[in-house]
Image (spheres, rainbow, N blue to C red):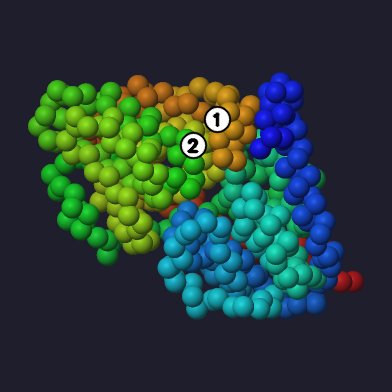
Amino acid sequence: MKMKQAVRRILPDAAALKLKKAIGMRNSQKMLERKKQVQPYRQGYYQQGINLIGDVQAETGLGQSMRILAGMIEKSEIPFEIKQTNLHGNLEHNDNAWAHKLVENVKYDVNIIHWIPETWAADYNEADNSLFDYRYNIAYWLWELEDFPDRWLPGIQTVDEIWTPSEFISNSIRKKTDKPVITIPYAIEVKKEGYLDRKYFSLPEDKLLFLTMYDFISISERKNPEAVIDAYMKAFPVGDFHVENDTVGIVIKVNHAEEKKLVELKDKLKNYKNVYFITKNLTRLEVDSLLNMCDILVSLHRSEGFGLPLAEAMALGKPVIATNWSASIEFMNEENACLVDYKLIKLKKTIGPYEKGNYWADADTSHAAYYMKKLWEDKEYRELIGKDAENHVKEHLTYTCSADRMKNRLKEIYEANSIC
């Protein structure tokens, strides 16, 4: 603590931040250097196939990412199995959709390792070398800003290549490495029946309901729920016909809630009726049902590495109001979504993994309010946006497309490493 205070006193902010980055990178490097050298890929040493490594049982966005990857591999018909490794933190691990694929000791020659870059060095250092030796190691990484942090660069030395779900992430990493960085987008597939209804969530049947969803683990400042609430209040101010006549409401789904921040959000809406906070951890069926039974999803995020809930809502034919920046616009456009204007702002302080000096978006809440009002008033427009969204996801974010990309890339890897 005294060292940190001394740094702040002696160095200006920019120099202190540079030193902090250097220390973080050095610590990560030292941690990885303590590990015995991993043996390089040797084709034929193991049978061909994929070992998917990560937390497939977690009831989080990263857990859902793992489950989608498993579905994509299965669709590709590449032999695979899954090694469960728990994410850090106090999380629930109750999703057993892929329990039949779990193994303790993996047998295939390609690893797809879905650990977060922040804890990569620790996770890698703790794992036994037998997990990596003689295998082709691929990191599947997520990130949300245009600049990939330097402190994570030592992790790149431990893998043969990197996959990501979006060009936005891929481009941020390509700036920092010459190793292959391949975009393998998520596949989005939803069912059309079997969902829970509004009654299950104690929500009214006769209201048009907006929905916003975020997880404090994902850093609420990035998800920016305050902006959604501000936009809602601008669209439907106290005394507005729709508010007074109980025709509109908002559902705010919060995972891993921080009580202080939750109280602040509730206080902003204290004069509103039909505000519904859902704070308990939901199963996958409950999450899907919530997306299905609400009318409109709103996400005024500052940045997204992909935007899974947005794509899932679109697949269900729901209009989505979202910030017109970052990875989500790779599957959203003016025809299939309500894209909100923004300005890029510089982070004045480090927030979680997002370092001071980086940029992210600040959505225009007045523009978002305009879309909220328009979608409420114009049913034809609402249905058109929803239909275009559904059609776009069905055409471009399919398991077949993603599986083919994965299969083709593995073919290229095998050909490049073939034994003559």
Q: Is residue 250 above or below residue 64?
A: above
Identify the residue under disc 1.
360
Q: Could you tell me the amino acid type at mark 2?
A: Arg
From this viewpoint, which residue is outermost toward the right? 420
From this viewpoint, which residue is outermost toward the left? 245
Q: Residue at x 75, y 40 (%)?
A: 23
In the image, 190 versus 133, the foreground residue is 133
Q: Is residue 313 above or below residue 365?
A: below
SS at circle 2: helix
Sequence order check: which comes first, mark 2 or mark 1? 2
Is residue 304 rendered to the left or right of residue 22?
Answer: left
Viewer can see residue 207: yes
Q: Could you tell me the amino acid type at mark 1?
A: Trp
x and y percent of residue 332 in the render?
46, 39
x and y percent of residue 148 in the render?
67, 39
Is residue 320 rendered to the left or right of residue 305?
Answer: left
Q: Quadrant of the C terminus?
A: bottom right
Q: Residue at x 69, y 75 (%)?
A: 108
Q: Which mark is residue 50?
A: none
Instruction: Locate residue 9: give its quadrant.
Output: top right
x and y percent of residue 52 in the render?
61, 67
x and y percent of residue 311 in the render?
43, 47
Q: How many marks?
A: 2
In the image, 367 versus 380, the foreground residue is 367
Q: How far apart, in angstroms, are the residues tagged by discs 2 and 1?
A: 8 Å
Identify the residue under disc 2.
222
